[in-house]
Amino acid sequence: MFTNRRIERHQLPCCLQVFNRFTDKPIGYLGNISSEGLMLASQLPMMINVDFELCLKIPGLEGDVHAIDFTARCLWSREDINPQHYDSGFMLLQAPAEYGQLILALSQYFSFVPQQASA
């Protein structure tokens, strides 16, 4: 069953690694992101209808790392076009305000909208 997307998603090919919040072990990479959820690219399939405690570690300007902890439920998981890789879709259940700020920052970074020249 195919569902048309109504939420704009921003593609993020292997930029940000996603970790298990409690074990700090990497589980995959952020494939895309929206205010409603995300897609995770990983080497193993994810369990469906399970809530995951996840963490994104965002690099700072001076080498520091800022962690964004959130809870998401895996809605689907399927093999990627690349062998031995899987894509999994997650619905966001609980996230701090920094998650929304991350979406805004990433959309600005990856946008090709010309910047206004200052006078």
Image (tube, rainbow, N blue to C red):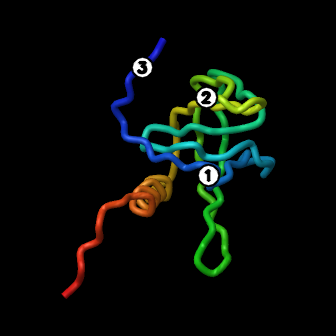
Q: Nearer the viewer, mark 3 or mark 1?
A: 3
Q: Which x, y percent locates residue 12? A: 55, 49
Determine which quarter of the picture holds residue 16: bottom right
Q: Amino acid at mark 1?
A: Asp
Quadrant assignment for the C terminus: bottom left
Q: Amino acid at mark 3?
A: Thr
- Looking at the rendered structure, which numbered label has been put on residue 74? 2
Residue identified by numbered label 3:
3
Q: Nearer the viewer, mark 2 or mark 3?
A: 3
* Residue 106 versus residue 61 in the image, above or below: above
Could you tell me which residue is drawn at 59 percent across and 56 percent down?
A: 68
Return the residue nearer the eye: 91 or 42. Answer: 42
Q: CA distance from mark 2 to mark 3?
A: 16 Å
Kindly state the secondary structure of the residue where label 1 is placed.
strand
Is the residue marked by circle 2 packed among few (<14), some (14-19), or many (20+) residues within 10 Å? many
Kindly state the secondary structure of the residue where label 3 is placed.
loop
Asked if disc 2 and disc 3 are in contact, CB closer than 8 Å, the reply is no
- Looking at the rendered structure, which numbered label has been put on residue 69? 1
Mark sitting earlier along the chain (1/2) = 1
Q: Amino acid at mark 2?
A: Cys
Q: Which x, y percent locates residue 6? A: 34, 31
Q: CA distance from mark 1 to mark 2?
A: 16 Å
Q: Which x, y percent locates residue 4? A: 38, 23
Could you tell me which residue is drawn at 36 percent across and 60 percent down?
A: 112
- Looking at the rendered structure, which numbered label has been put on residue 93? none
